[in-house]
């Protein structure tokens, strides 16, 4: 990156603001991100981001998803009297040709969106209030887009959380045994296979139309929520995987990280226990917003969705291990094996806690 390129991109987006300084921004593993600051508080600051088109094969489709969702939310905010909509929803800017991206000479896709000043994310939940507000933030986000037509958006990554597809990829990895690691993983493989019938139920419900296809976020980690200086929620960010799905993906994936006392790759499985307080707080925040629009089956499947998302993540890690580590970045040779054991450990913890979790959800549920 250099000053000339920054100027070139701003120009292509029709922006005339003078940039006082720019620097790389955030710790994303997928996209390249730069913060562009202007002088004073009148002109906006910007985020310039190169979208990784090796991971996201249809960047214009992805941007169309993002703009559809953010426009929808912005209209509602404004109609509701919101005076600072650009702090409450991401604002992706259009280039002078009307697209929401500009391509460089190497074919890379660059996007520009407004930077939300005086905002921050958190990496880990450390108290129940944070867990409650995280639940509320994701519930609110889903509520805002609950009246959108799920089929209008493209699948940014086809079959991203499709259990049948993930399971087939797992079976293929077992039969191909590319890295010769299968025989060392038979115990774990068997335990995951044993649970397949229960876990494939979710995709069956989707295929049969029993679960509504909605727009979902699909990466509901806590660090994808922005807070202001006072700790109030501003908005949900990282909308790259926004696409059709079931809200169960988002609820389950949030608990995959927030409910686990340990990291997803903790090697010592004795350190893995269920953070009941955070689960209770998250669920109550989440349902305070989402009780209004969730169907009965969605509500009754919240606890199941936590096990589903952890099972899916476990087979994704094991699939990658059996394939010889081709998808996830690894920090050491056995990383995917450790991730598999760790997530399998957490799955068992969730199974042990299932009845207690159901009881807790029932407290906040309005059927
Ligand atoms: C990947 O790169 P990151 O951490 O945002 C993956 C998620 C997994 C996660 C597991 C596009 O997300 O689905 O849950 O790793 N994203 C993609 O750590 O595959
Ligand atoms: Mg992400």
Image (cartoon, grey):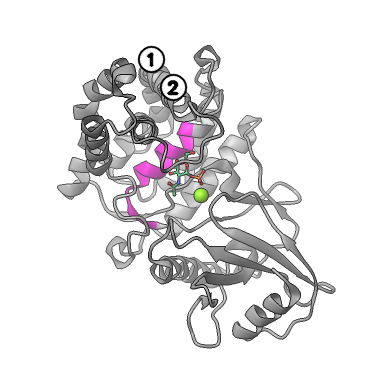
User: Residue 23: which numbered mark, if any?
Assistant: none
Q: Residue 309, position in %: x, y?
A: 37, 35
| Percent x, y of residue 202 | 24, 38
Q: Within the image, what quadrant is residue 297 found in?
A: top left
Quadrant location of residue 341?
top left
Percent x, y of residue 164: 22, 41
Q: Secondary structure at mark 2?
A: helix
| Residue 91 drawn at (x, y percent) | 58, 70
Q: Is residue 254 magenta?
A: yes
Q: Is residue 59 magenta?
A: no
Q: Nearer the viewer, residue 28 or 259?
A: 28
Task: Out of 172 and 26, give the one closest to the viewer.
Answer: 172
Q: Quadrant of residue 198?
A: top left
Q: Is residue 283 visible?
A: no
**Residue 352: numbered disc:** 1
**Disc on the earlier residue, 2 or 1:** 2
Q: Which mark is residue 346?
A: 2
- Which span is picked out in magenta? 243-256
- Which of the pair 356/53 is nearer the observer? 53
Q: CA distance from mark 2 to mark 1?
A: 10 Å
Reply above or below: 302 against 152: above
């Amino acid at each position: 990156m250099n000053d000339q390129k920054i100027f070139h991109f701003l120009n292509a987006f029709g922006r005339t603001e003078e940039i006082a300084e720019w620097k790389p921004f955030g710790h994303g593993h997928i996209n390249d991100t730069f913060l562009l600051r202007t002088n004073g508080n009148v002109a906006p600051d910007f985020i310039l981001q190169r979208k990784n088109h090796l991971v996201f094969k249809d960047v214009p489709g992805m941007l169309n998803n993002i703009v559809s969702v953010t426009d929808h939310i912005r209209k509602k905010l404004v109609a509701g009297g919101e005076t600072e909509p650009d702090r409450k929803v991401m604002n992706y800017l259009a280039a002078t040709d009307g697209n929401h991206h500009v391509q460089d000479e190497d074919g890379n896709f660059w996007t520009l969106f407004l930077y939300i000043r005086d905002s921050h994310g958190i990496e880990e939940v450390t108290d129940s209030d944070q867990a409650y507000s995280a639940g509320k933030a994701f519930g609110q986000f889903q509520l805002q887009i609950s009246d959108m037509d799920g089929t209008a958006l493209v699948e940014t990554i086809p079959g991203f959380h499709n259990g049948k597809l993930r399971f087939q990829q797992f079976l293929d990895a077992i039969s191909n045994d590319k890295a010769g690691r299968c025989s060392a993983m038979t115990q774990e493989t068997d335990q995951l296979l044993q649970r397949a019938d229960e876990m494939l139920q979710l995709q069956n419900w989707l295929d049969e139309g029993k679960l509504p296809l909605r727009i979902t976020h699909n990466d509901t980690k806590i660090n994808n929520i922005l807070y202001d200086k006072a700790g109030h929620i501003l908005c949900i960010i990282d909308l790259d995987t926004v696409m059709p799905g079931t809200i169960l993906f988002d609820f389950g994936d949030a608990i995959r990280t927030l409910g686990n006392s340990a990291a997803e790759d903790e090697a010592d499985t004795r350190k893995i226990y269920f953070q009941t307080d955070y689960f209770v707080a998250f669920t109550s925040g989440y349902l305070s917003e989402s009780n209004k629009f969730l169907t009965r089956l969605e509500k009754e499947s919240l606890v199941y969705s936590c096990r589903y998302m952890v099972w899916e993540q476990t087979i994704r890690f094991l699939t990658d291990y059996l394939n010889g580590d081709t998808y996830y970045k690894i920090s050491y040779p056995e990383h995917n094996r450790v991730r598999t054991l760790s997530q399998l450990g957490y799955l068992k913890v969730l199974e042990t806690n299932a009845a207690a979790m159901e009881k807790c959800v029932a407290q906040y549920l309005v059927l």
